[in-house]
Amino acid sequence: MRNKIQTFISAVLLLSVISPVTVANGAVPPIKLNRVHQNSAVDKYNAFESEKLRISIDDSSSGFAEGKVCDLCEEIRVTITPETKAFEKRTEVPLKNARSRIGRFATVIFEVKTKKAIAIRW
């Protein structure tokens, strides 16, 4: 019996050490992930897929797109320039066609350092 009690107490202590930290009100604090890569292509370029794309493009083909690289990552805003390419089913289309993707699925590929959009695909 003593052995079972010691095992139970050890298990409870172990679970309390490895469980997520909670705030006074019982809520779990937000977690921010820092993605680390060893691949130079991933270090230079990244992408986010959006179920409901938030994008703004003016008549001069400039604007921005917002999204997250992962569910726990912070939201980022990338700049759309006239050099940004748009692709529909692997075929390049005019950038103004990307406006039709507002609120719909799309993938935005961007440069990590400059946060400049390279391509928008759907």
Image: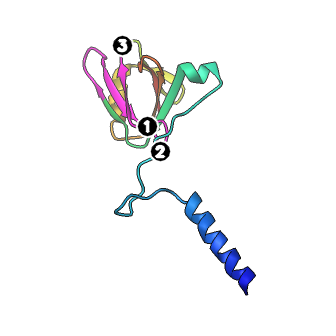
52, above or below 57, in the image: below
Q: Nearer the viewer, residue 56 or 78?
A: 78
In this rendering, would 100 be left or right of 109? left
Residue 61, position as x, y percentages in the image? 31, 17
- Residue 89 position within the rendered picture, expressed as x and y whole percent measured from the top left: 52, 30
Q: Is disc 2 placed on a helix, strand or loop?
A: loop
State how far apart marks 2 and 3 are (Cα).
29 Å
Front position among marks 1 and 3: 1
Location of residue 39 (image quadrant): top right
Q: Please name the amino acid that badge 3 sits on.
A: Pro
Question: What residue would you read off at disc 3?
Answer: 82
Give the residue number, with chain letter if any, for mark 2. Answer: 71
| Cα–Cα span, label 1 and label 3 | 23 Å
Say which element carries label 1.
loop
Q: Residue flagged by tag 1: what amino acid is it?
A: Lys
Q: Nearer the viewer, residue 112 or 66?
A: 112
Q: Are marks 1 and 3 in contact (CB under 8 Å)?
A: no
Alpha carbon distance from label 2 to label 1: 7 Å
In the rendered structure, the answer to whether residue 35 lies left or right of residue 39 reads: left
Range of residues picked out in magenta: 56-82
Q: What's under tag 2, amino acid-wise? A: Asp
Asked whether the residues under the numbered discs 2 and 1 touch, taking CB atoms below 8 Å apart as contact, a structural biologist would say: yes
The one of 76 and 97 positioned closer to us in this rendering? 76
- The disc placed on residue 68 is 1
